[in-house]
Image: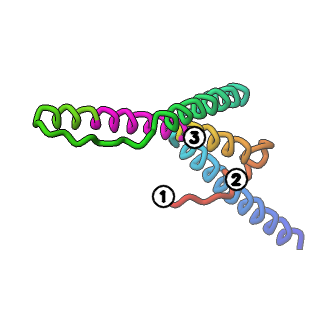
């Protein structure tokens, strides 16, 4: 009876060692996969992220105000002479290009804010540290 009890303990220890090794391997694999993810704001501290987000938000608000103020409807004037028509086309093209440039800058600012917010969400997900350890240990990612 004592030998069968000792054999079961050894089997249990072997099973626990295999389970621990598998969980450790899964943790390492998930940590390596996370390290390769593109996160442009990973190196910033939480305080720096908050400052950057506030600055980006004020810049976005400023750019949005400029875009809205500089976006009146363009009226095309009918010209009789070919040279005047070319000049009018060029004027409208420049106004349209300026509007597109302003819209692009507003969109870029908004995209930067979304990336900062995504970084903050990822950081919050892993607080406190045991949540990150459990997530990396028990999350399975297909190869």
Task: Name the residue located 83 percent from the left edge and 72 percent from the top edge.
Answer: 4
- Quarter of the image for the N terminus: give it: bottom right
Q: Residue furthest front?
A: 80
Residue 138, magenta (yes or no): no
Q: Bin the neighbour count of mark 2 within 10 Å (Cα to Cα): few under 14, some 14-19, many 20 and up.
A: some
Q: Which residue is mark 3?
A: 115
Residue 79 location, quadrant: top left
Q: Residue 135: which numbered mark, if any?
A: 2
Q: Residue 143: which numbered mark, if any?
A: 1
Numbered range of the magenta stretch: 92-110
Question: What separation in Å lies between label 3 and label 1 (alpha carbons)?
Answer: 26 Å
Where residue 142 appears, as percent x and y from the top left, is 52, 61
Residue 103, magenta (yes or no): yes
Q: Residue furthest left?
A: 82
Question: What separation in Å lies between label 2 and label 3 (alpha carbons)?
Answer: 22 Å
**First-in-chain label (2 vs 3):** 3
Tell us which disc is closer to us: 3 or 1.
Answer: 3
Q: Are marks 2 and 1 in contact (CB under 8 Å)?
A: no
Q: Horizontally, is 84 left or right of 45 in the view?
A: left
**First-in-chain label (3 vs 1):** 3
Q: Bin the neighbour count of mark 1 within 10 Å (Cα to Cα): few under 14, some 14-19, many 20 and up.
A: few
């Amino acid at each position: 009876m004592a030998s069968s009890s000792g054999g079961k303990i050894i089997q249990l220890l072997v099973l626990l060692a295999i389970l621990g090794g598998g969980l450790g391997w899964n943790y390492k694999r998930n940590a390596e996969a996370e390290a390769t993810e593109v996160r442009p704001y990973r190196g910033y501290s939480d305080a720096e992220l908050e400052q950057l987000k506030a600055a980006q938000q004020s810049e976005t608000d400023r750019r949005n105000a400029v875009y809205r103020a500089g976006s009146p409807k363009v009226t095309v004037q009918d010209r009789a002479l070919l040279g005047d028509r070319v000049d009018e086309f060029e004027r409208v093209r420049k106004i349209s290009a300026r509007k597109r440039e302003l819209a692009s800058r507003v969109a870029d600012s908004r995209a930067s804010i979304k990336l900062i917010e995504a970084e903050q969400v990822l950081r919050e997900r892993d607080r406190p540290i045991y949540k990150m350890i459990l997530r990396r240990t028990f999350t399975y990612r297909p190869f």
